[in-house]
Amino acid sequence: MRKSLWAILIMSFIAFTLAGCATTRDLEKVQAQEKQTSAKAEQALQAAQDAQAAATAAKVDTAAQLEQANAAAMKAADAAARAENALKMAEERAKMAEERAKMAEEKTAAAEEKAEKADVIFRKSMKK
């Protein structure tokens, strides 16, 4: 009985140890899954690096565009200021021209009055 009990125990132990070991097929499956997982991780890493590069490029482009827009805005502001100054100067010149025209009209009127007086005096002197 002891021999049969030992035989059963040894057989059970061998069965458990063989059942617990992985077969070559199981190892190949695990290796294949590991390779697939590694490939997917590499693809994800590459996609993340591409996205980061694209974001960096977009950031650089955006910064350059912002600088260009700021420069254009400054040029436009300068041009607007120059236009306002030119307009003010033109208005001042127009006022000065109007004043000169008024003065010229006044001088012309005064000269005409003097001419009329001189003409009246001349006619009086001719009548005598």
Image (cartoon, grey):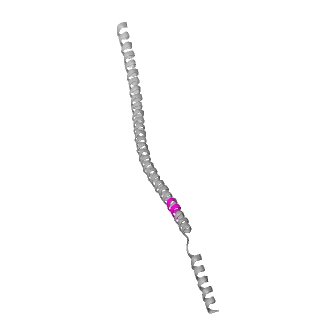
The N terminus is located in which quarter? Answer: bottom right
Give the percent coordinates (x, y) of residue 83. 42, 37
* Front one among 36 and 90: 36
Asked if 45 appears above or below 67 in the picture, the reply is below
Which residue is rendered at x = 60% and y = 82% of the image?
Answer: 11
Q: Quadrant of residue 7?
A: bottom right
Give the percent coordinates (x, y) of residue 46. 47, 56
Magenta segment: does it hold 105? no
Q: Is residue 3 visible?
A: yes
Residue 43 left/right relative to 100: right
Which residue is rendered at x = 53% and y = 65% of the image?
Answer: 28
Residue 3 left/right relative to 94: right
Residue 23 left/right relative to 84: right
* Front one among 29 and 44: 29
The C terminus is located in which quarter? Answer: top left
Asked if 100 appears above or below 70 in the picture, the reply is above
Span colored in magenta: 34-39
* Front one among 27 and 95: 27
Q: How many marks?
A: 0
Which residue is rendered at x = 43% and y = 41% of the image?
Answer: 76
Asked if 2 appears above or below 24 in the picture, the reply is below
Give the percent coordinates (x, y) of residue 4. 63, 88
Q: Residue furthest top?
A: 127
Give the percent coordinates (x, y) of residue 99. 40, 29
Q: Main secondary structure of the magenta part?
A: helix
Q: Quadrant of residue 14?
A: bottom right
Q: Residue furthest bottom?
A: 2
Q: Is residue 128 visible?
A: no
* Front one among 121 and 10: 10
